[in-house]
Image (spheres, helix red, strand yellow):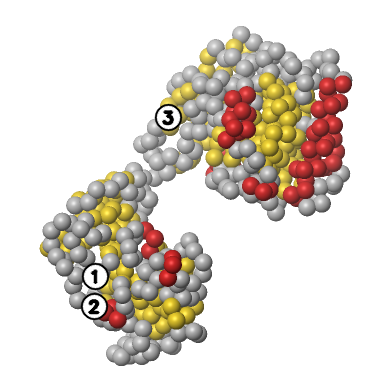
Amino acid sequence: MRASQFPRALRGLLLSAALFAAACPLAQADIVDAIEYYYASLDHYFVTAIPAEISALDNGQFPGWVRTGLSFSVYDAGTGLPGAVPVCRFYGSPAAGLDSHFYSASVAECALVKQKYPGAWLLESNDVFEVFLPDLATGQCPAGSIPIYRAWNNRADSNHRYTTDIAVEQAMIAKGYIAEGYGPSATPTAMCSPTGSGGGAPVCSASASDVAPYVGATITLVAHCTGNPTSYVWSGCTGGGHCSATSSVAGVQTYSVVASNASGSSAPAAVSVSWQQLPPPPVCSLIVTANSDLPVVNSLALLTAVCSNTPSSYNWTGCGSGNNQCGARSPVAGVQMYSVSATNPGGTGAAANASVDWQSSPAAPPGFCGQFPSFLFTDEGWTGTRLVTRDFTDDPGFAWNGVWVVKLTVPPGAMSTQHGGVVVAEFGGQPTARQTTLSRFPCDFRATDPTGNNGPLSQANGVTTSLIFGLGASSGGVPGLTPGNVYYVNVRNWDVNSASISCDPSLSRCEAFMDVGLP
């Protein structure tokens, strides 16, 4: 049976289980296991406490689903134990690109899913099993229960994993999953699993708001305990149910907590934190894109900062922005200077500068660009990065009948025995045939001339084009770029087979990206 048939078939099993529970009410609160399964090709997790579903899965009725070996305790559906709450279950319709299940112990969240996603998430049951809700502010579970964590895969197919194992939850977060639930911790609590021990000494787990912080940062450690502890003793920091920790040295540090109540003390619960050395401050380059090499006053000049070492903020001069791109416009002609510096936990790097020579009226097009209705011009300098024409919002941009010119300036002292290159392809649209050239002249689509004197050094044609280059003398058919010289990558929407423009005029623009790799 196909994976997409699996949830539909379960709905019949689910209905049978519900009818049985209604006909045969339980005399006492029965704790059962919710078993976890995994489907590798979908990368999906699924839990169920319904015997008919467990039997069908274990007997191979739905090939591909296998037990992970993990489970957690829940009360059987219909138990109605004071304090316990029913868990609703939704099935994500394949017509909405889902084919998954979602569980919640919150009546409000169940109602919100029905309201916001009709036709996408279909309610299968208001009570597939029962658990406790944590304190909505702190995430603390009531006595006799432990946290159930919920992690969302953050993908369009929207699958969740539910676990009582804090190490499993943290591993999923490290893979890119998003933790969901209640409380201020980095691993909030979604539901609470009954342990069957309403009293007794606390049972604890511990989590950290950041398991890989930089030295000098302050993180919050949280103890998740049953049994309503009256005191907490931490190793490595001081506090109660929450405690703050910092470190001045890099490396792994383990923090543990013991919680106590009138019945005794818990076993130590530990969490490991890998403190990271502060990174060097960012080093930035500044790229300028405009509808000409010399933009007209009041037109757009898009400034893009490309910075190393993961900046947390950008500081612009001459342009206002809070991110790595800033749109500049000048009401007056003349040369305007712009700069940007970036900051990370290691400090603020040196400013990168760029000048824009604003024109009162359109200047004569450079090279062969006068042969085209328009050209989008990017002064890339000598920076390995991805460039995207859609980032430039003013028309004509990379027009259907225009050219995209990227200027490369090889530093005088550049040295490398490796090859660099550029790759050009469609961005966010239908694949479009293109012609790409590497030349000493802008908008140069003449026949190739390996000397570069009477045509491009090299060219490529197709939906995805790729050009390779080196530094110094040309070798083995690979053109060499001379340090200290300027070169141009020229791109147009052109089908060489039909010798015609390949972009539909009704689209106005056919956006592209260019990956620039330096030697």
Between 410 and 441, the residue placed more toward the observer is 441
How many C-alpha atoms fall within 10 Å of the one at disc 3: few (<14), some, or many (≥20)? some
Question: For the residue marked with disc 3, what is the amino acid?
Answer: Ala
Badge 3 or badge 2: first in the primary sequence: 3
What residue is drawn where x is 40% and y is 41%?
A: 214
Question: For the residue marked with disc 1, what is the amino acid?
Answer: Asp
Mark identifier at residue 293: 1
Which residue in the protein does label 2 denote? 366
What residue is drawn where x is 65% and y is 40%?
A: 119
Residue 511 visible at all: yes
Which image quadrant is residue 399 in?
bottom left
What residue is drawn where x is 39% and y is 84%?
A: 458
| Image coordinates for residue 388, horizontal then vertical, percent | 39, 62
Image depth: mark 3 or mark 2 in front? 2
Q: CA distance from mark 3 to mark 2?
A: 60 Å
Image depth: mark 1 or mark 3 in front? 1
| Image coordinates for residue 55, horizontal then vertical, percent | 85, 38
Which residue in the protein does label 3 denote? 245
Q: Assign a secondary structure to mark 1.
A: loop
In which quadrant is the C terminus drawn?
bottom left
